[in-house]
Image (cartoon, rainbow, N blue to C red):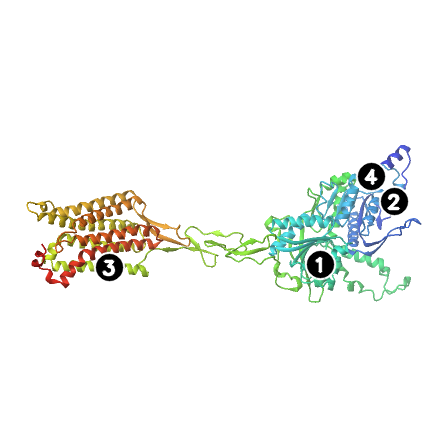
Amino acid sequence: MLIFFYILLFLHCFHTRVDNTVCRMTGDSKYPLLSKDGDFTIGTLFAIHSKETLPSFEFRQKPQHLFCSSVNLRDFRMAQIMIFAIEEINRSNSLLPNVSIGYKIYDTCGSRLSSMSATMALMNGHDIAAYEMCNQQSPIHAIIGETESSATVILSRTTGPFKIPVISPSATCECLNRKQYPTFFRTIASDYHQSRALAQIVKHFGWSWVGAVNSDNDYGNNGMAIFLKAAQEEGICVEYSVKFYRTEMEKLQKVVDIIKKGTAKVIVVFLSHVEMGNLLDVLNIENIKDIQMIGVEAWITAKSLMSQNNFHVLRGSLGFAVRKIYIEGFAEYIINEFWNTAFPCSQIERNSSEHGLNCNGLQDLLEVKNFNEDISEQRYSSNVYKAVYAVAHSLHSLLNCKEQWGCENSLIVPPYKVVEALKKVDFTIKTGDRVWFDSTGAVIAQYEVVNWQQDLDGSIQFKPVGYYDASLPPDQRFVLNTENIIWAGGQLEKPSSVCSESCPPGTRKATQKGRPVCCYDCIPCAEGEISNETDSINCKQCPIEYWSNAEKNNCILKAVEFLSFTEVMGLVLVFFSLFGAGLTGLVAILFYSRKNTPIVKANNSELSFLLLFSLTLCFLCSLTFIGRPTEWSCMLRHTAFGITFVLCISCVLGKTIVVLMAFKATLPGNNVMKWFGPYQQRLSVLAFTLIQVLICVLWLTLAPPLPHKNIKYYKEKIILECSLNSIIGFWVVLGYIGLLATLCFILAFLARTLPDNFNEAKFITFSMLIFCAVWVTFIPAYISSPGKFTVAVEIFAILASSFGLLFCIFGPKCYIILCKPEKNKKQHIMRSF
């Protein structure tokens, strides 16, 4: 539609140029609400009234002008600050000397139709005599307005083709970017910064579950889109995101119903002050309170919303407000203007009867109204002030103004040159604020964080509790003083707004299927894993030598397991080891005390004593397997076991051979005993033992057993054991013992038929059967036993085989010596042959 309008305008101008006729204005002119002539003119569009009454469209008569009502004080004050700034510049000797600035202020009535009409009036002018030809330059050099983003979008699209600069003091929509609107400027930051700052304030207070409401227009939709993206980046979940426009009352009711049913206690409200007023009306009707509102600059400091009914809903609200700047002289100016206009008697003596006015009793009127304080709260006034001065500085540079000679006011300044000059302005106003436009046409984002509170006198105040300044380093931009904040419902404690409560240390978050990531279950960490932070996403595996404690929030050293002397099993094994060694010692004492008796002499007393000595060592070597494994104990336990058992079996083997040789020696003409006398017996035992010693030396040299922490068998504890390091070495030691035991068993089995009184071969046979049975069953038990039970099985095998040898070989002899002494005589033994 707009393009069609441009085409008609172009064709009309082209036709008049061909006919060489002047432009003709049709219809009634739209006159500005306030105006003043000057060398250069600034146009202004403000919604000084907020309601518009449409005329009759019956087409029976010429359409009447639109009627506006309901004064919008915020925009009215903007118009006043603009006039104040222009008059201040016109009085200045340093800025635009000898050049005056005029203005035309149009009232848009908050209507897009009136806004378009006012825009056309600004661009075309209403005085045809001063604007005779269509190809003349625009009657204005810049436009300040509008105050709402959607209306500013329409304004910028309309004026853009004519290169007329538009400077808005309050349109914050990110959609108003330099790429699409190259002639647009604003003295307020875009919503890009505010929307992302909203996400930061929500994250700062730990709210992960929020609702979102926005105006269904350019301002609300663009601002909310940026917030939702920033919230997702910060890990904030939005329970619902709803919108409505100021005329959609049915949709507004649905929005309130969603808020009522929602579980989020915090709502981010991206509404203009008009939609916010509509929302508050319905919230009051539905009696919805105690909701923490997070607001934007459009409504967070709106005086029109300050009422006791609204305060029940908005109490404790937090939001970003345009930074308040006090313009020196403006309060006095506006008060004087108001007083002089409403009460002309102020210019004459109050007691005078001139003009029949009686001014008595009016002196305290403004104090009752508290008008001065009301003016200072207007945060957008400074933005209008900056916009006027930006245009003035642009003209100052274009007119080659010099303080001594003034300005060349005869120069023609087309609006597009003002656009280029505005891009370069950089000045400081009298408040100390620096004004310049960045690449997007906006100023640096600077906000106050305000909190809706109530003073002791019951008045509603916007208390500053922090700030956001994009000009500072990232870690210093956002500052909050939480101690001074009053929360929703007047509470002193911050409300909680989460979908799921925080997961304590020792648990991890598990997202609930089909729900946002902020809705989760708390799952305890598995064994060996911990989480030492609140709301951990994953549990961390403990280091290899550590294990999780009972609460799963800390890693502790794993329990180290080994067969110790202090535990019951260790004590029992120590007892039997010492008991076996002591019992063997008693047998040795008994044999020594009866060394001259026939039964001791007949059973080779020398080998018997050597066997008893080796058995004592076998019992004692089991003690090396108990206790904390060390490098020396690991090497000692296996080698001592191997050597002492070979010494023991060698003695048994020697006794077996002696029995066989002794029987052969009794045959006539057989002198075999000379080949296996005491010297040969000792030599054979030494030879068999040296072979095992050599095997053990090779094992210790090439791959000795060493302490090893076994973490594979148990996850929750460490088994401290002696690693064999060489399986071959271990099995060679056992194999050699087994070979000697098998040989001994065979020889003893062959000698079993010898005379009973002389023959101990059958006892050796029984002992070797026990020995072999023990060690054959030892192998699977050793392999399958876990941890310290492996060592216990090995000790049990040593003790069992040692007791077997002791009882089978020496038990019968001790019985005869102690219980049957009559059989321990030479005559009794000789009768056995």
Amino acid beneath label 4: Tyr
Amino acid beneath label 3: Leu
Name the residue carrying label 2. Answer: 126
- Secondary structure of the residue carrying tag 4 is helix
- Secondary structure of the residue carrying tag 3 is helix
Closer to the observer: label 2 or label 4?
4
Other-residue count near label 4 (Cα within 10 Å), few / some / many at <14 / 14–19 / ≥20? few
Amino acid beneath label 1: Asp
Q: Are marks 2 and 3 in contact (CB under 8 Å)?
A: no
Q: Are marks 1 and 3 in contact (CB under 8 Å)?
A: no
Kindly identify which numbered label has been placed on residue 578. 3
Amino acid beneath label 2: His
Going from the N terminus, do you reach mark 2 or mark 3 first? Answer: 2
Kindly identify which numbered label has been placed on residue 6. 4
Going from the N terminus, do you reach mark 4 or mark 3 first? Answer: 4
Going from the N terminus, do you reach mark 2 or mark 4 first? Answer: 4
Displayed quadrant of residue 699: top left
Name the residue carrying label 1. Answer: 257
The spot of residue 350 in percent (x, y) is 85, 64
On screen, residue 435 versus residue 701, left or right, reads right
Q: Residue at x 70, y 51 (%)?
A: 431
Mark 4 and mark 3: Cα distance apart in space:
116 Å
Going from the N terminus, do you reach mark 1 or mark 4 first? Answer: 4
Closer to the observer: label 4 or label 3?
3
> Which is nearer the eye, 595 or 49?
595
